[in-house]
Image (cartoon, rainbow, N blue to C red):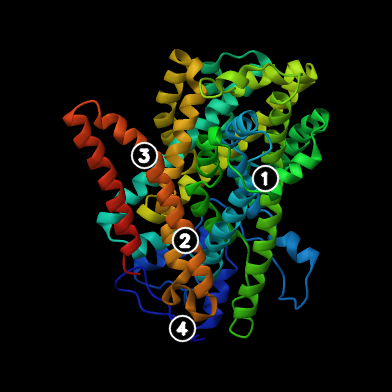
């Protein structure tokens, strides 16, 4: 790699600054201050941007505070160094335990018992691979995924790509608001529609911590994960599950014939498209030594510790999801719970509210209390990470800079209308609504996954030192093809159902499917 800085100006009249000293001086500035300085100098024509090569550009992360120091490069493993990098992975893992995942877990346990634990593990392992690629893009290039999409895709592709991803974030926001509202209803008897409004207000409180720096927000997320582990773990302990069957469910891949829908829902619920944009940006809060003599070694060190931290975080997420599945598998396979699903599995599944009643019947009043506290932690923490992801997506892909507060006001206003309608007019359909939103996440996933794979394999973007190998490319594209095929599997029954209602409906359904596949093809075939 060329050690000479190859800085480029943001203003057309600017000239390059090729001194390593200038690049290091900028690296020591807070991100927002560095950005403002560059803009001011470019506007007056008295200076230029001091960003260097891809490996020396700093993130333009809005209102994230100063960088977290990681210290000098170390040749051996260090727990102190791991602690320096700990935070972004746990924030990323919040999306794996949001209310949509919790609902999916209890359905899997109710219908399939312990048999789908292996699928939970596989989806978390796949999630680790995808999240690692996303983080590597941010660490190696100094730019997040949304910023790269802005550079690599034409406006005609970028705008619909942004809209699809924004729609997925809004859908996730609806799930989280409903989950929080249900938790407030279970804890305090607050009506669902009032709980939705209160959930929106609580989100502002959590995001207010960003004014105190990235570490404070990350600590809150870790605390939320700990609360979920304690609550759901205690319920699993009270259930006294069969560990032999749990081991069999983890090691023996099988999907019962009556649990196909739930198995498909696991993939759609666990891996969230907005998480790729979030993780690639959050890793920019760590300062990495980029001087020529230690640059590659420091980046490899950052990649290693970020991967380890992400693996630990997703292990906790897997445990949380698995405990929920195990609890409801135990309830529906024993005399403690009602036999609601034994004859009518396809007609009715327990929802987040009904789950509290089942837990009370099985464990007494402590059951629904722990359930509600865990659900509240899940809903509020995932709301905050979703808003942060939307911020990075909007700023990076469309160059639209708005404050976190305005961003939340916009997203909440858009999502509040359908959420309030469901909460007030169709409270009994909350869980069906949640399942449709999981389908939306699955449909949107290729539009975040494909750019991630294309960037991670590009030597022009990642350099030959950090582009993924041929075998990992093959694995990634196989996974992407499987997810796209899964989406077609999800869409095809709906298309056929609409096609049977008349010629106009049939044309609209087939056209929508064709446009979806066409746009996936455009994103895949874009020349990076």
SS category of the residue bearing label 2:
helix
Residue denoted by label 3: 491
Looking at the rendered image, the quarter that the C terminus falls into is bottom left
Q: Going from the N terminus, do you reach mark 1 or mark 2 first?
A: 1
User: Dot 4, how many residues are within 10 Å of its Cα: few (below 14), some (14-19), or many (20+)?
Assistant: some
Name the residue furthest left.
503
Mark 3 or 4: in front is: 3
Q: Going from the N terminus, do you reach mark 3 or mark 4 first?
A: 4
Q: Going from the N terminus, do you reach mark 4 or mark 1 first?
A: 4
Residue 422, by quadrant, is top left
Mark 2 or 4: in front is: 2
Please give left or right for residue 229 compared with residue 413 in the image. right
User: Dot 3, how many residues are within 10 Å of its Cα: few (below 14), some (14-19), or many (20+)?
Assistant: some
Residue denoted by label 2: 478
Measured Cα–Cα span from mark 4 to mark 1: 45 Å
Please give left or right for residue 49 compared with residue 233 in the image. left
Do callouts 2 and 4 mark residues in contact (Cβ within 8 Å)? no
Residue occupying image coordinates x 72% and y 19%:
337
Of the numbered discs in the image, which one, if any, rests on residue 18? 4
Residue denoted by label 1: 317
Image spot of residue 146 (x, y percent):
43, 57
SS category of the residue bearing label 1:
helix
- Residue 141 in sight from this viewpoint: yes
Instruction: Tell me: residue 323, above or below residue 290.
Output: above
Residue occupying image coordinates x 38% and y 60%:
149
Instruction: Tell me: residue 203, above or below residue 527.
Output: above
Do callouts 4 and 1 mark residues in contact (Cβ within 8 Å)? no
């Amino acid at each position: 790699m060329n050690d000479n800085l190859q800085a480029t100006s943001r203003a057309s009249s600017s000239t390059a600054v090729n001194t390593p000293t200038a690049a290091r001086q900028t690296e020591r500035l807070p991100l927002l201050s560095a950005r403002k300085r560059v803009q001011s100098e470019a506007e007056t024509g008295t200076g230029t941007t001091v960003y260097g090569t891809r490996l020396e550009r700093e993130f333009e992360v809005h209102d994230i505070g100063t960088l977290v120091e990681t210290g000098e490069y170390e040749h051996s493993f260090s727990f102190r160094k791991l602690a320096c990098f700990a935070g972004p992975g746990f924030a990323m893992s919040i999306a794996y335990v949001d209310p949509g995942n919790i609902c999916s877990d209890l359905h899997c346990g109710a219908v399939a018992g312990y048999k789908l634990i292996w699928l939970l593990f596989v989806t978390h392992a796949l999630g680790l691979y995808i999240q690692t690629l996303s983080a590597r893009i941010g660490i190696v290039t100094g730019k997040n995924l949304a910023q790269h999409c802005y550079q690599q895709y034409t406006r005609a592709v970028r705008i619909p790509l942004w809209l699809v991803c924004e729609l997925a974030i809004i859908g996730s926001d609806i799930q989280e608001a409903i989950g929080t509202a249900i938790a407030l209803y279970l804890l305090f008897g607050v009506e669902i529609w009032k709980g939705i409004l209160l959930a929106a207000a609580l989100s502002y409180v959590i995001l207010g911590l960003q004014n105190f720096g990235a570490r404070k927000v990350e600590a809150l997320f870790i605390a939320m994960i700990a609360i979920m582990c304690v609550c759901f773990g205690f319920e699993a302990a009270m259930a006294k599950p069969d560990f032999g069957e749990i081991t069999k469910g983890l090691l023996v891949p099988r999907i019962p014939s009556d649990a196909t829908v739930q198995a498909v829902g696991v993939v759609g619920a666990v891996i969230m498209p907005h998480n790729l944009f979030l993780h690639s940006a959050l890793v920019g809060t760590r300062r990495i030594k980029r001087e020529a003599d230690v640059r590659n070694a420091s980046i490899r060190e950052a990649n290693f510790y970020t991967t380890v931290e992400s693996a630990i975080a997703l292990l906790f997420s897997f445990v949380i999801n698995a405990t929920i599945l195990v609890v409801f598998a135990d309830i529906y396979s024993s005399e403690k719970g009602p036999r609601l699903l034994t004859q009518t599995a396809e007609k009715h599944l327990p929802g987040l509210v009904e789950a509290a009643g089942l837990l009370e019947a099985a464990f007494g009043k402590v059951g629904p209390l722990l359930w509600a506290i865990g659900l509240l932690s899940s809903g509020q923490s995932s709301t905050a990470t979703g808003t942060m992801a939307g911020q990075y997506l909007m700023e990076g892909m469309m160059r639209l800079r708005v404050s976190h507060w305005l961003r939340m006001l916009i997203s909440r206003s858009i999502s509040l209308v359908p959420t309030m309608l469901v909460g007030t007019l169709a409270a009994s359909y909350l869980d069906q609504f949640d399942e449709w939103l999981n389908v939306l996440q699955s449909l949107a996933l290729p539009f975040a996954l494909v750019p991630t794979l294309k960037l991670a394999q590009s030597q022009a973007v990642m350099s030959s030192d950090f582009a993924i190998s041929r075998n990992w490319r093959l694995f990634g594209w196989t996974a992407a093809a499987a997810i796209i095929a899964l989406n077609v599997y999800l869409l095809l029954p709906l298309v056929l159902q609409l096609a049977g209602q008349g010629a106009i409906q049939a044309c609209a359904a087939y056209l929508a499917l064709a446009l979806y596949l066409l746009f996936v093809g455009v994103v895949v075939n874009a020349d990076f």
